[in-house]
Image (cartoon, rainbow, N blue to C red):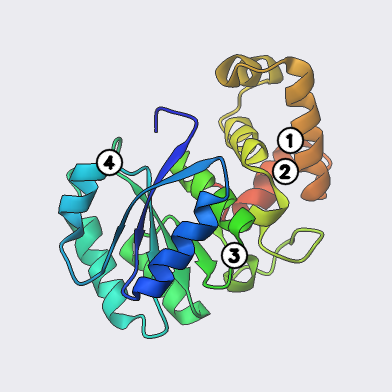
Amino acid sequence: MTGSIVRVLIAARDPLAREGLANLLSLESECTVVGQTSLDVDLSSDNETVHPDVVVWDLGWNPTEAVDGLSDFMEGLSSPGEGDPAVLALAPNEASAAEARRAGARGVLLRDAHAPQLVAAAVAVARGLVVTDVELAQDSGPRSPAGGPLAEGLTPRELEVLGLVAEGLPNKGIARRLDISEHTVKFHVNAIMGKLEARSRTEAVTRATRLGLILL
């Protein structure tokens, strides 16, 4: 991902689901929808044509075939690695979410996720983080104060800062990387620690890891 706007390709069997997701994401400035595609076609051509940062993959209400398609897509990636899109799967239940994870999805949300959740999760997975809806998480560790998905509790910028904190960067290094002031970084770090109910940066990273937001 090279720019600040996340390029999203929507993949869903149901055309109404595709249109609905496109309408939701088009309301948010952090994302731009670069294409829509059915699961009945070869997605590799769409991937090579529109170069998305993230594929939002709707598993639908009968997810078996959708998960098989996701496995095929991940196996067909050239690396997978730098330049390949991350997949954010939308799952109807915990079982299908686990299958999507095993197939290679970096993020999993429930299908009824709201636009801010979708955008925050898309930004997070595009930047290399792992996102799991708390309702789908196996771990019984700490939850966001609101009790909802942590991707909803943390803003896209906070997710960026969190990822850099996990890399061990000090505030000055984070400020330089994101081209913002150290004061702004400190503000974001304090907000992250508050939302995670953490008393230190290390504890914040640990809790975020247990929640599935960071892959170490």
Residue identifier under label 3? 133
What is the three-letter code of the residue carrying label 1? Arg
Establish if 88 lies above or below 124. below
User: 10 Å neighbourhood of mark 1: few (<14), some, or many (≥20)?
Assistant: some
Establish if 216 lies above or below 2. below
Whichever of callouts 3 and 4 sits on the residue coming sooner in the sequence is 4
Whichever of callouts 2 and 4 sits on the residue coming sooner in the sequence is 4
Q: Are marks 2 and 1 in contact (CB under 8 Å)?
A: yes
User: 10 Å neighbourhood of mark 4: few (<14), some, or many (≥20)?
Assistant: some
Mark 1–mark 3 distance (CA, rounded to whole Å): 22 Å
Q: Nearer the viewer, mark 3 or mark 4?
A: 4
Tag count:
4
Q: Nearer the viewer, mark 2 or mark 4?
A: 4
Mark 2–mark 4 distance (CA, rounded to whole Å): 33 Å
Q: Position of residue 32 (x, y in %)?
A: 44, 44
Answer left or right for 81 relative to 190: left
Q: Nearer the viewer, mark 1 or mark 3?
A: 3
What is the three-letter code of the residue carrying label 2? Ala
- Quarter-of-image position of residue 147: bottom right
Whichever of callouts 1 and 4 sits on the residue coming sooner in the sequence is 4
Q: Position of residue 205 (x, y in %)?
A: 66, 42
Whichever of callouts 1 and 3 sits on the residue coming sooner in the sequence is 3
Q: Secondary structure at mark 1?
A: helix
Mark 1–mark 4 distance (CA, rounded to whole Å): 35 Å
Taking the spot 59% from the left edge, 66% from the top edge, the residue there is 113
Taking the spot 63% from the left edge, 72% from the top edge, the residue there is 135
What is the three-letter code of the residue carrying label 4? His
Q: Position of residue 119 (x, y in %)?
A: 55, 50
Q: Which of 104 and 73 lies nearest the eye of the viewer?
A: 73
Establish if 89 lies above or below 93. above
Residue identifier under label 2? 204
Disc sitting over residue 201 in the figure: 1
